Amino acid sequence: MNQILPNKLVKAYVYGDTVEMTTANGQQEQIIKVIEGKRYVNLETGEIHAMDTSSSTRLDNLKSTKQTMKKLRRLVSHNFTGGINQLWITLTYRDHVTDPAIVYMDFKAFIRRIRNQFGNVDYITVIEPQASGRWHLHVLLKNDSELTIPNNDLAKMWVKGFTKTKRLRRADKVGNYLIAYLSNLQIGDEGSENKAIIKGARLHMYPKGIRIYRTSRGIEKPLEITTTKAELMKTYKINSPPTFSRTTKHETHYGVKEYTTEFYDNIKSLSDTFGGATDKLSR
């Protein structure tokens, strides 16, 4: 397993009780200078190469969607840890609605009804494509005390179709769970012996340019830091090996690039950083 060296410059994301750091820090292409004629020069060697522009729009869109899902996972993990103040609501349509603009317009009316009845709540809402062309909405909802809304009441406020409500628990690892749910595609009926899950298949169904998620103003963004690994380990008092590490290869216009990402979970010092804003007791 590749490890990030202490003096290596990394891009770090700090969210919830996790520190995530990657060598894909956005400053790695400084040895490359783009020149005319769809070419680039390697500033270290002086060599001139043609840029590979053969990637299809669909592949570029898939890459963009994956990046959005990474941002969403961090955002959810930073703001939703499970507890009595948090709900996961799924909204579906009885009619064949295929226009995302209509879906988000309906959501605005829905969240307005919730706030009129239950006071201020914060949310992250995510649109999910279906093979039929329809859309579902997933809504993570929270307040600063206790949030209990019967599913029957939510269905009356949604009015467009069906609702499903789930209490978020600490054990759910909400960010990872939601992204897996949004990314993977089930083939076959629920309960069928032939049922199969195809990882990442749903990501291909998102059209180019769609705004996959939206948030309320009270949703906090993770911290983003560019520094050395050693400085991060010192700042957040991390003395243990990473909880998880992976090295991946990526096709770019400048050739194949290899990046290593490390995750450090359950970092106690982060309770001082974020003040436990999302940390509500479970019942």
Image (cartoon, rainbow, N blue to C red):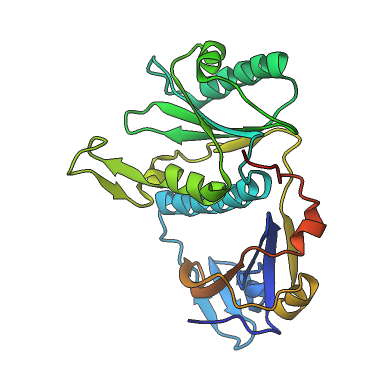
The quadrant in which residue 282 appears is top right
Position of residue 246 in the picture relative to residue 108 (left or right): left
Residue 135 drawn above or below residue 39: above
Q: Depth check: 114 or 59 in front?
A: 114
Q: Residue most toward the front?
A: 283
Q: What residue is drawn where x is 44% and y is 40%?
A: 206
- In percent of width and height, residue 1 lies at 48, 81
Residue 123 position, x and y percent, is 65, 33
Q: Is residue 236 above or below residue 5?
A: above
Pick the quarter of the image with the C terminus: top right
Instruction: State the image quarter where residue 7 is shown.
Output: bottom right
Count every numbered label the image shows and give the total: 0
Along the viewing direction, whichever of 94 and 173 lies nearer the viewer: 173
In this rendering, the answer to whether 270 lies above or below 125 is: below
Q: Residue at x 31, y 50 (%)?
A: 198
Q: Position of residue 118 (x, y in %)?
A: 70, 18
Residue extending furthest toward the bottom: 45
Does residue 93 appear left or right of residue 44 in this picture? left
User: In the image, is 50 to the left or to the right of 213?
Assistant: left
Give whichever of 79, 249 is nearer the camera.
Answer: 79
- Residue at the left extreme? 193
Seen at 57% across and 13% down, the residue is 157
